[in-house]
Image (cartoon, helix red, strand yellow):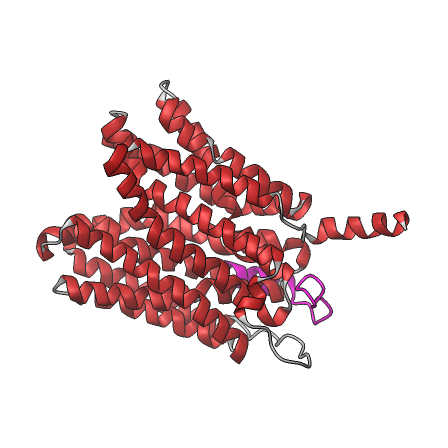
Amino acid sequence: MATMSQAGAGKQRSARYQFIMVALLSLTFGVVFFDRNALGFLMPFIQPELGLNNSQIGMLASALSLTWAVSAFVIGRLSDSLGKRKTLLIASTVAFSLCSVLSGLAGSFALLLGARLLMGAAEGGFMPIAHTMVAAEVSPKRRGLAQGITQNFGSNLLGSFAAPVLLVGFATMFGWREAFYLAGVPGLLCALMMWFYLDEPAAPPKHDGPKASALEVLKNRNVLICVSLSVMLVSYLVICWAFMPLFLTQERGIAPESMGWLMGSLGISATIGSFVVSGLSDKFGRKPIMTLMPLLGLLLPFGALFFDGSLWVLAVFFFFGWGVNGIFPLFMATVPSESVDPRYVATALGLSMGLGEALGGVLAPSLAGVAADAVGLQAPIWIMAGLSLASLVIALFLKETAPSQVGKAAPVAAAAE
């Protein structure tokens, strides 16, 4: 089975086009997370007006994660079958922008739930297709860096920094419904730019014989490892978002303002890691970086549990611990795309993203909540530590795919024969 690393004989895009494509895809995925995170930031305004209870708020978050997971696989598979990457990408962008407007029109929990279900379905397919385009168009030597920027840079810059400031300020001045309308506008502008500036990537070479099923793609060792890492680390991610603020304020007695700065350090870490971690994997290999970062990921839960010194030092623990976020593009996109036949890249990416979102994004917060009710808020933090350790062990079984390292291994193997 030919891999993406081996499929480099086609026409190479110009450096200018590669830059524009990665920048535009990163910007658009930033808008995706701007829209996705809008509900959480606007919930203090929404809850009293719609009379929502905490269970309903949790259902709204899980609903989007569920349809996001299904869409990541279904749309990824569809793009492999049709080959219309650009068309599906633009359709997805327009759809999630309209769903943001629908969220603003919702007058009840049921209508808001429906809008979030539709938004998850619209957004979930975006990143598998985007990563497939990057894998096909960007030089293999810069693939890890390009996919890291595509997935993490815009999403953290807009979703973690710009969204709370702009949306909350806008909602305070004009109302939460108008803030949802504001969130929908950038996506339409991004769809328009993609229409004019992106080209449909060349179709992968055709091969005789039946196509592989999703199950057969999942049997690829690297794909299975990446799916496992996705489940572990998406769980780590969402548990931290859901329970770390509560643990810091209620168990550690940290003031809400200080807690906000600590959590803000995660966004700074992820934005920097979007190009640093992925770039290092291009130079030193995927496996060493994907093994090291889960080890650093232990700093965050252990710092929260045991460090009693300066909050500035604790922020350093948080910053470096959250560096594990930098390998998300590697196990969700780069390694799967370098491990399978080019015809099945979006399928492999959809499996990694979809199963990670389904099992991590939907189930993990609920299970961590049950554990917190049973033994206290420290339980989810210990679960984070366990997930990080499990990820380290899983990554040890990865087969190296970085072109810089695979190229070195070939002459060595030849000399040994």
Residue 198 placement (x, y as % from top left): 52, 71
**Residue in the picture at 60% in, 61% down:** 337
Judged left or right of residue 270, residue 43 is left
**Residue in the picture at 48% in, 69% down:** 76
Q: Is residue 113 visible?
A: yes
Judged left or right of residue 199, residue 95 is left
> Could you say which is closer to the camera, residue 122 or residue 68?
68
Residue 74 placement (x, y as % from top left): 44, 71
Q: Quadrant of residue 10?
A: bottom right
Judged left or right of residue 11, residue 343 is left
**Residue in the picture at 68% in, 79% down:** 207
> Could you say which is closer to the camera, residue 82 or residue 217?
217
Q: Quadrant of residue 124?
A: bottom left
Q: Is residue 309 above or below residue 292?
A: above
**Residue in the picture at 32% in, 57% down:** 36
Please check the rendered image and state whether residue 3 is part of the magenta-colored stretch, yes or no: yes
Q: How many marks?
A: 0
The quadrant in which the N terminus is found is bottom right
Q: Magenta span covers which residues?
A: 1-24
Q: Is residue 160 above or below residue 349?
A: above
Please check the rendered image and state whether residue 48 is part of the magenta-colored stretch, yes or no: no
Residue 231 placement (x, y as % from top left): 45, 51
Q: Is residue 354 above or below residue 144?
A: below
Q: Hey, which residue is sitting farthest front in the picture? A: 374
Q: Quadrant of residue 27?
A: bottom left
Q: Hey, which residue is sitting farthest top in the picture? A: 309
Residue 119 placement (x, y as % from top left): 31, 65
Q: Is residue 24 visible?
A: no
